[in-house]
Amino acid sequence: MSETILQAGILIFVAAGGTAVVFNREPLSQAMVVSFYGLLLGIMFFVFQAPDVGLSQIVVGAVALPLMILLVLARVKKQGRKSD
Amino acid sequence: MTRRVRKIFFLLSAAALVWVFFLAYSPLAPFGYVQSKYGDMVNAITVPERHITDAVTAVNFDVRGFDTLGEEFILFTSVMGVLLLMRRQKDEPAGDHEDKAADRMIPPASDAVRVTSLLLIAPTVLFGLYIVTHGQVTPGGGFQGGVILSTAPLLLYLCADYRPFRRAVPQRLIEASEAFGAAAYILIGGACVALGGLFLQNSLPLGQSGSLTSGGMVPFINLGVGLEVSGGLSLALLVYLEELLEEKEQ
């Protein structure tokens, strides 16, 4: 029973997190929100008894993906300044 | 296309999507009901035949080891792509654009951040190594542990400034270890062929189930993957910091 509540709860959090990512229109803050969303997905995998996938999800979704987005943002900003 | 037409178009395609989802999901087994012959088979063979207590690692690095080789090289090629795109080009000399606030330096990190990240470095490295080396016993492995290891340079940057960080990080060594880690997977597989077996056939002594040395070749493959992943992500991080900070520091 408590497991079901936990699973339902994390699913609601994940749905809310995904919606938050989509409705955030500012790329820099979106990178932060997507990082938090990655952490939520990791917890979801853990709750659904897939700790291996959960670990991968945390490291990819909460660390690697936001890093890539920030990298691109830094690059784009630099080029934007150059063409001014 | 007016707003109204777009809305109608959206509603129609949303309805179609819901219908397809319904068709796809309705024949599935109910939630929580597991029936998978493959899963039962994996659970049955991993401990007796491979002495690996983490079934996911057994599948990834033994049962379908060749697929994981491809996955590892996806990461390798992506890191290479990032490095290629981010490199300083010939027609792009350093500092060719104006710094809008040249007199304003990056604010130094607070003492709390410095001390916390200094204290975190050693546990992070230790935890990363633990995850890499215990892949065959508990959840984790070279991939997850490698990413954890690659956050150690980030902590080093947070507790020092950019220049001492750059001096402390051996970029050539990281590049070499990334390449070696990627090559190790193929070399291990090739060694099996050279010794008369199949590619990636687990041909080392399997050891005691649940111990660090169990699983035959799997811990060695995990070490290689750990080197490759930690090296690759550290390089991506270095490029990012370079891109962001180099000119400010000059």
Image (tube, coloured by chain):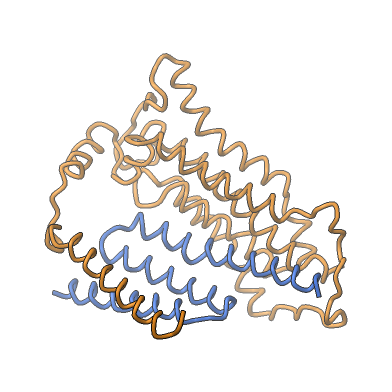
Give the color of chain B as drawn: orange
Query: With A57 as the anchor, is B63 left or right in this view?
Result: left
Q: Residue at x 20, y 77 (%)?
A: A5
From the top left corner, tell me how far across and down residue B181 is, in percent.
57, 39
Which one is nearer the viewer's eye here, A1 or B240?
B240
Q: Outermost residue toward the top?
A: B196
Q: Is residue B2 shown above or below B20?
A: below
Q: Residue at x 12, y 62 (%)?
A: B30
Query: With B73 as the anchor, is B156 left or right in this view?
Result: right
The quarter in which the C terminus of chain B is drawn is bottom right
- Residue A54 figure quarter: bottom left
Q: Residue at x 81, y 75 (%)?
A: A84
From the top left corner, tell me how far across and down residue B148 is, in percent.
52, 57
Numbered-mark total = 0
Q: Which chain is blue?
A: A
Which one is nearer the viewer's eye here, B214 or B44?
B44
Query: With B194 as the anchor, is B198 left or right in this view?
Result: left
- Residue B32 figure quarter: bottom left
Q: Is residue B96 shown above or below B60?
A: below
Q: Is residue B95 shown above or below B37?
A: below
From the top left corner, tell me how far across and down residue A53 is, in percent.
36, 56
Q: Residue at x 19, y 71 (%)?
A: A3
From the top left corner, tell me how far across and down residue B79 is, in percent.
60, 50
Q: Outermost residue toward the bottom?
A: B4
